[in-house]
Amino acid sequence: MPVGERSKTAKVDEDAAGSTVDDRPDQPTSVPDELGSHWLMFGALLLFRMLNALTIRTYYDPDEFWQSLEVAHRYSFGYGHLTWEWKEKIRGFAHPAIFAVVFKILRLTGLDTGQYVVVIPRLVQTLFAALADLYTYRLARKLHGASTAAWVLFCSVVSWYHFFCSVRTLSNSLETTLTVMALYYWPRMQKGQKGLSTNSRHAYRKALILAAMGCIVRPTNGLIWLFLGLHLLKQCSGSRWQLTVDTLFVMICAVAASTLIDGIFYEELTFVPLNFVRHNLLDGIASFYGTHPWHWYLSQGYPVTAFTFLIPIVWHASLNRFADLDKELLRLIGWVLTVYSMLPHKEFRFIYPILPPTLVCAGKALVDLKRRAVRGGPKQENLFAMLCLMLVVSNAAMAYLFGRVHQRGVMDALGWLRERSQKTGAHVQVKDIVFMMPCHSTPYYSHIHAQVPMRFLTCEPPVRGTQATYVDEADMFYQDPRGFIRNQFHDDPKLDYRASNTNVSNSIQWPSHVVLFEALLPEVQDILVEKQYSECARFFNSYFHDDYRRKGDVVIYCR
């Protein structure tokens, strides 16, 4: 490689963390212009993620809608449902504010139609998804060089969980992007180095800002930076005072910015992180939504999200004992899995931020396995090719199943209802809707985008009560569906169908449309027929489900 070209490449990555690219023998001898290649790469990744977003047709987690788009829709258009978290002020508005701005722009430009309101926020999310891909590549390039970075980008694009989750409007998706960006700028100490260079300190400040943004979006992201920060302080004995000053300054600014944003939304001074810790950790409210054994992340959560990319990592480890993998990333992954395993409530998306570091390790393992295959002859090369093919096929199958098939019925049903709620002259006009389903089984006003009266079975936790004896409305319904209907449903238009107090009899007015899962039909079909309802739409939802209440098609009855 020419000296000038080598210096140019090294300078760019030194700005990231004060270290040069590890240029290995099997890398190309010429490296394209760094800035130009990254813009081109980002454009290609953005196009891919846009296609990714338009391909996804399924429902994953309620928070994708209820804690982001629904809140933004209420703030921007004046109607929408706020869950108990917003009433107790344990959610920050920083993440929904992104989509509130999008909705405001759509409203000002007259483009706030149902289809645009649904599609545009997900296309905006593709910006963050593409940035996650790009910075995963850049992190790998900084740590291991261009050859490994190319394989890591392959892993990032092929990963089924990235495809499934990165384009969704979950706070975890944005948290993951901010985390991998901050990891790229995070300084790496060399042996014998006691302090940070000027470039490394500038990079550290960038990392701090991005990490602070991640903590604003999700306060639990602080666990990652607590671990890395203490490790850096231990290594960097000559710059501890400078690191401490920089950290405190960014923390104060982040808290002030977060408090200001939340104050605008709540219209009063609110410190959300304190409320979050008090309710979810100290009061144990999070466990109301399910508990898992301590080993769940090790036995299910991590193997499912990383999926078959664990195979090259384990294969490489069996040969080299992790000798060439980045120890700091491995320790970070281990730290997150260990700490999160101590929490009773566990979800796949909670450990999403450690997927990019995992893919960096997988890409590095693939590079080393490829070298062994080349030295081992045709049989080894064929085995390596089969490994790569298996990674593509297995992840593509998972992406198709969970992105296009599993739980798509609830999304199709909402599209059907949205189309008919906005056409007053339609053959079947939607006047009001009751979702006779487990709580938050579908999106809500953010996907209907019409001021149609709606009602769903609630599942608010006992914020100031005892969990042992508490039964939420949805559970009460499924304990005795027929009894609940007799007690709660009425045909008197003078009564408020939207009342959510389950102690008040006849609080739900029979609507024009009832949405339910097929599993409930044997219990309530005769009642619906008696009330002159008939089936007007049915949508395939899933071949299997771990919740018996959600099995079968999504069925819409109307009258």
Image (spheres, rainbow, N blue to C red):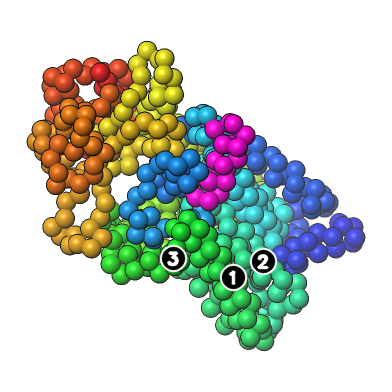
Which amino acid, by three-letter code, is at mark 3?
A: Thr
Quarter-wise, where is residue 493 in the image? top left
Tag 3 or tag 1, which sits nearer the N-term? 1
Which quadrant does the C terminus fall into? top left
Q: Is residue 191 left or right of residue 119?
A: right
**Magenta stretch contains residue 105:** yes
Which amino acid, by three-letter code, is at mark 1?
A: Cys
Residue under the image location 67 percent in, 87 percent down: 238
Tag 1 or tag 2, which sits nearer the N-term? 2
Which of the pair 418/201 is nearer the observer? 418
Residue under the image location 35 percent in, 23 percent down: 430
Q: Mark 2 = which residue?
A: 206
Q: Mark 3 = which residue?
A: 270
Residue 149 placement (x, y as % from top left): 67, 53
Q: Is residue 484 left or right of residue 146?
A: left
Mark 2 vs mark 1, foreground winner is: 1
Q: Which disc is residue 253 wearing? A: 1
Residue under the image location 74 percent in, 49 percent down: 38
Residue 86 placement (x, y as % from top left): 38, 55
CA separation, marks 1 and 3? 16 Å
